[in-house]
Image: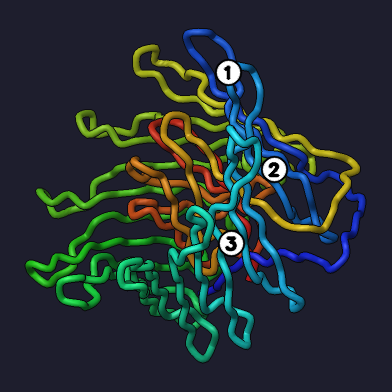
Amino acid sequence: MKKFTSVIIVFACVQTIYSQNLLDSTVEKSWFQTQNKWNNMQKVVYSSYDLSDSVLEYYSQSWLSTNNSWRNSQKYIYYRNSNGDLDSSMTNTWDQPQNKWRQWNHSTFTYNSNKKVTLQIDKAFLGTSWRNSTKLSNTYDSKGYLTEFVRQTWNATASNWRNSQRIEYVNNTGGFADTSISAYWNMTTSKWTANRKSTYTYDGKNNVLSQEDQIYLSSTSTWRNSSKWTYTYNANNDVTKAERQTWDLTNNSWRNSQKTEFTYDTKGYLTKELLNNWWVPDTAWRQFSWIEYTNHTDGRIDSTHTKSWSLADTNWRNSRKKNYYYNTPKDTTDTNVSVPSHDIMGKGQVNLYPNPASNFVRINLPGQDYPQSGTLTSIDGRVVKTVNLENGYVDLNGLQNGMYILRLNVEGEAFDLHLIKQE
């Protein structure tokens, strides 16, 4: 299994360079059917890059229709130590009444001799001081493959760490996970209790062919099927189809649930993503949403256009539109990195954490059910993986270093979150 963590440089002195075709900003708009027009929704500004053209700072803004202006939302800042490893990160949130950024979360990272993250401690800023919040621990075998992940939360009353979640990995000879078993900490028995197991299969090129998830039934001490993903690839190892099935308890068999089909141009750049849902009464697939990509000749994304299928109109209806703007040349200053959160309209702030990540990321969607699925797309528009989001976690097993866009489908709408990682 490959492990990932993002590493962002901060030099002792500020250095400015000029590069071409760097992403300057993205603007996302939502279609208002009653007004028959596009309205601003979300803006992300990429304000700083390092000497290798890796983004170092960007922040999110949300649109205020009351005064037709953008307002800051959140900002994440990452710092490297003298060895080039990520030393700490700072999360700020915008205080509108005070018109300034306020500290919110702080993370520190510890590495082993192979520069793999072994410990991450998160702290929350409460009032005037920092308080422990979450501790994430990784254990590796002699080959450097991840074998265990443990999440703990801070018990303020007892002033100690309390177990929360554990994931154990069994890897194949290539370092990819054959199985992963999740468990939660049982407060009554003070023991780990298994609750979920994932089993993976691969082809000869280490592409994931299937992921089968099971839940643990403590009443019978057995595993029961829950969901299954199967993947199809083209000759370029691009995902062309991802199908999700759920377990039918009545018939003891797999039942279709969701299917996503991907289309690429002759250069291998993603041009279309079609999501279908299984309609049980008709025992047939029904179109659900459609995303069209427009790319530059070098593969950079120019825009995305999302449409949703209207059963009433039996036609495609506008949903969202996102434009990507590039700056040539770009003034880049090596200082820090920021990763935005996203405000899904009416659904609250959405965050990925830990971000950077070492083996997985968790989606925080307060007060909402997790979307069933999502896709990871590289910055050049290639879909590299579809992911199962039933438990709010995204498994990063088998992915290469770089920046990715995690696209979520929430109630028929498509939303993008950015993820940076590096081995």
Q: Is 114 left or right of 296, judged from the image as shown?
A: left
Against 370, is 124 above or below? Answer: below
Q: Residue at 92% across / 50% down in the picture?
A: 18
Image depth: mark 2 or mark 1 in front: 1
Q: Is residue 181 visible?
A: no
Type of residue at label 3? Pro
The residue under label 3 is 356
Against 176, is 6 above or below? Answer: above
Instruction: Name the image quarter holding the C terminus.
Output: bottom right
Type of residue at label 2? Thr
Q: Residue at 50% across / 30% down in the picture?
A: 290
Element at label 2: loop
Mark 3 vs 1, N-terminal side: 1
Query: Are dots 3 and 2 in contact, CB under 8 Å?
Result: no
Type of residue at label 1? Ser
Spot the residue most to the front: 128
Q: Which mark is residue 65?
A: 1
Q: Residue at 54% across / 52% down in the picture?
A: 104
The residue under label 2 is 266
- Real-space CA distance between mark 3 and mark 1, rounded to the nearest whole angstrom: 33 Å
For the image shown, how many numbered marks are present on the structure? 3
Spot the residue most to the bottom: 142
